[in-house]
Image (cartoon, helix red, strand yellow):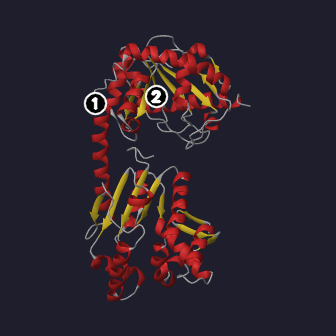
Amino acid sequence: MSEYGIKKVAIDGLAASGKSTVAKTLSEKLELSHLDTGAMYRAVAYGVISGEINPDNEPEVVKVARKSNIEIEAGRVALDGRDITTEIRGKDVTEIVSKIASYKNVRKQLRKKQLQWLDAHNGGVLEGRDIGTVILPNADLKVFVTASPEIRAERRAKESGRPFDEVLASIKARDKFDSNRKHAPLKKAKNSLEIDTSGKTVEEVVEKILTEVKQRYETKLVEMTDGIDPLKAQRHIGAAFISMLRCIAYPLFRAYFQVSVYNRKNIPKKGAVILAPAAHRSNLDTPMVGAMAGRRLRYMAKDSLFVKSRFWSRFLNLLGGFPVKRHRLDRGALDTAKKLLEKGSAIVVFPEGERKVGPRIFPLFSGVIWLSQHNSTPILPIGMAGGANAMPIGKKMFRPKKVVLYVGKLIHPPEERINRKELDQLTEQLRETLQELYDKAASLLK
């Protein structure tokens, strides 16, 4: 999922409108995988040609779509294990792909494959001609890309080397066919952002999309968090609710996950403290720390969690969460954390930021040290191991795998103000400490 809470993006558009380049660039900006669904239809068309099947024989074409193993990764296309990336762009494939794509049951078979791909990649940017209307009608973002026939013909003629007039006639015929076909015709989906790429660079188009994404996201975040005060978090109701959850979760976690907590006595029972757990490898990490801490905690949680619904944002607030923007300095979140520490709260901050993969503790955000120094608050480092086995990233179900938390000693901030160089040095020292604690926790999994 991207930092704007976007997991599924639908990009539709006319032939040669630039949607493929836009989709690929946008997927990189949003840190999502990219799927050119048109390449799937071309792969089927290639399979029909190589199998010497008449493209008018719909049942046989459907059989090819159903039985073919189509793999699309990093711009490469493979059919039944053979790389056909170049071949599917040939003239023979281009001449029959529209007919292949017009068959209802071919589209049905490929829709299954596209949704399987989406699930395997935990979301992504899908481009085609019926993504927003058929494949992903509930996409987080829908974009419809267009351009004048002349501009599109000029682009395609440069790519293929074919005469402009010939390409222009072909594009107009393709537009008419795609827009009037019986099954899943090309049309703009509801609530989609329409962009005319004529005379625009890819960077300009993508920037316009990202600007719209940011505006929608900020508007929704304000709407979903309206009326929530992170400094209160329903103090009385929340405290009782958390105590009840802890009473249930603690024995459950210990029994199901065989959770072991070493040096639990190092966790202060009261007073301001910053809990810094690592390695952050699973969705279980946050509830695991909350259940094992023995006191009420407040959490910095990525703001995309708060845009799902009003109920969800209030539930997270009840649990002690408050939003923080990732990948950039969020002075608002730091100010909230600072005020909570002044009230004597215990705050959980995952210093690696987002979840990572592997046993290495990645470079930390310096905000943890900054908070500690500006509030004269100690940091409690915690090594966590086993969470990735119990609930790997991208999985919705957890497994009964052992989890170990190894609690370190309090790290007190320097009494004197520190400069940027010293801040970076202390951040690296914390990373090294967390690596040692994680390694100890990992060794105890065996």
Q: Is any atom of residue 15 visible in this view? A: no
From the viewer's side, name the closer residue of 57 and 251. 57
Amino acid, disc 1: Asp
Q: What residue lies at 45% left-to-right and 51% top-to-bottom? A: 31
Q: What residue lies at 31% left-to-right and 31% top-to-bottom? A: 225
Tags 1 and 2 in contact by the CB under 8 Å rule? no
Query: How busy is the neighbourhood of tag 1: few (under 14 within 10 Å), some, or many (20 plus)?
Result: few
- 420 vs 115, left or right, is left
Amino acid, disc 2: Val
> What is the secondary structure assignment of the residue under circle 2?
loop
Q: Earlier in the sequence, mark 1 or mark 2?
A: 1
> What is the secondary structure assignment of the residue under circle 1?
loop
Depth-wise, is mark 1 or mark 2 nearer the camera?
1
- 225 vs 434, left or right, is left
Tell me which corner region of the image, top left, top right, bottom left or bottom right, holds residue 203: bottom left
Residue furthest out toward the right: 446
Q: Is any atom of residue 64 visible in this view? A: yes
Residue furthest out toward the top: 270
Q: What residue lies at 39% left-to-right and 13% top-to-bottom? A: 236
Tell me which corner region of the image, top left, top right, bottom left or bottom right, holds residue 315: top left
Residue located beneath label 2 in the image:
349
How far, Cα to Cα, is label 1 from label 2? 24 Å
The quadrant of the rendering that contains the C terminus is top right
Instruction: Tell me where residue 83 appears, x and y as whole percent.
Output: 60, 72
Residue located beneath label 1 in the image:
226
